Image (cartoon, rainbow, N blue to C red):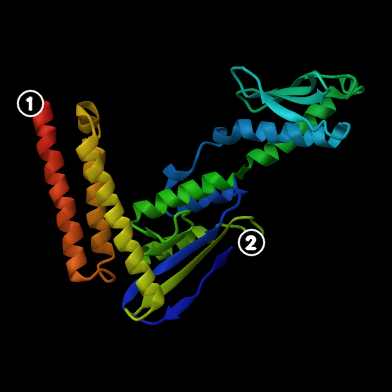
Amino acid sequence: MIANRQIDVEHFNGGLVVWDSGQMPFSNFADGMIAIGYPDLVPDRDGWKAEALRSTLMKFVGHYVKLPRGQAPEPVRLDSTTPSFLAQSTITTATDAVHVDILAARVDSNNKIEIFKHNPDFLPNLSAKIDAAESVFQSIFDAKRAMIPASKVTHALNTLLLRKTCLPLTKQGRVYAVPSMNTTNLLEIFAGHVPNDSQFSLGVGELHLPPTSSMFTKIAASCKAELESKLKEVEEQVQTAGDKARKNGAKARYDALEKVKDYVSEFSSVLDETQSKFLTESAERLQKTISATTVLDILS
């Protein structure tokens, strides 16, 4: 679902992206990422294969097995080469806790479900109807695998927005200032692939803000705080890292400082000249320190 609005003021010319976390159809997500040129952000569906099995097992047991109050089933992951789960109930007495197995299922490398263990006390007719039961189980599992989890959607969008030098305006993410209208247009293309009835929704809006705007002030303060925090983090790493960590992490720290300079360039309209100069010079000073210590580490 896409919401698009334009705020007709001036000076900071960019955009704002906000989303409500939720799952969405994997096919729509993949099509959207491919359409905007980021197929590498499409995750492997095996990444939530085990979770889909666990969730399917609990839904199946919850529907077909009636347990006494206080004996809700719990999923137990089994040690196996393929994802396998056991639904288990616990009967608690004054002196002991007895675990009772209910149903166990696994999924193979071809995503085929097998129910390989069940308790006839809870499912007395399952042996005679195992094919039908596995068919029901399979359909539930396939439907869950067809949806990309909310956490995967959020991770991919956060990765994309940080690559595009967008600025997070909250610690939780999901709200970013977008410095380039090209990026705003890209996000609108992706949002067009989100079904209207999806749990996930993405709002993209243009921003044209004067320095007197409260949103302009918020973006400026967030940008300054974010970049100062990144500089401080790298500086502390440079000062405290041991020889091996300093050498191994040199490129990542150097690249992080390069990203700080990118942010200064992209958000120059909200940073005054003094702030921009300080942040850029601080990043360059740390980069020189990293380069110098890296050479010394190599020579030592």
Is residue 37 shown to the viewer in this render?
no
Q: Is residue 114 above or below residue 11?
A: above
Return the residue at label 1. Answer: 299
Residue at 77%, 37% in the rendered image: 59
At which x and y percent is residue 152?
53, 44
Q: What amino acid is at disc 2? A: Asn
Front position in the image: 44 or 68? 68
Q: Residues within 10 Å of mark 2 (few under 14, many from 20)?
A: few
User: Residue farthest to the front?
Assistant: 94
The image quarter in which residue 130 lies: top right
Q: Is residue 43 above or below residue 83?
A: below
Residue at 17%, 61% in the rendered image: 278
- Considering only order in the chain, which callout, 2 or 1, is on the residue closer to the N terminus? 2
Q: What amino acid is at disc 1? A: Leu
- Is 297 situated left or right of 228 in this image? left
Is residue 235 shown to the viewer in this render?
yes
Residue 196: numbered disc: 2
- Is 184 situated left or right of 241 in this image? right
Local secondary structure at mark 2: loop
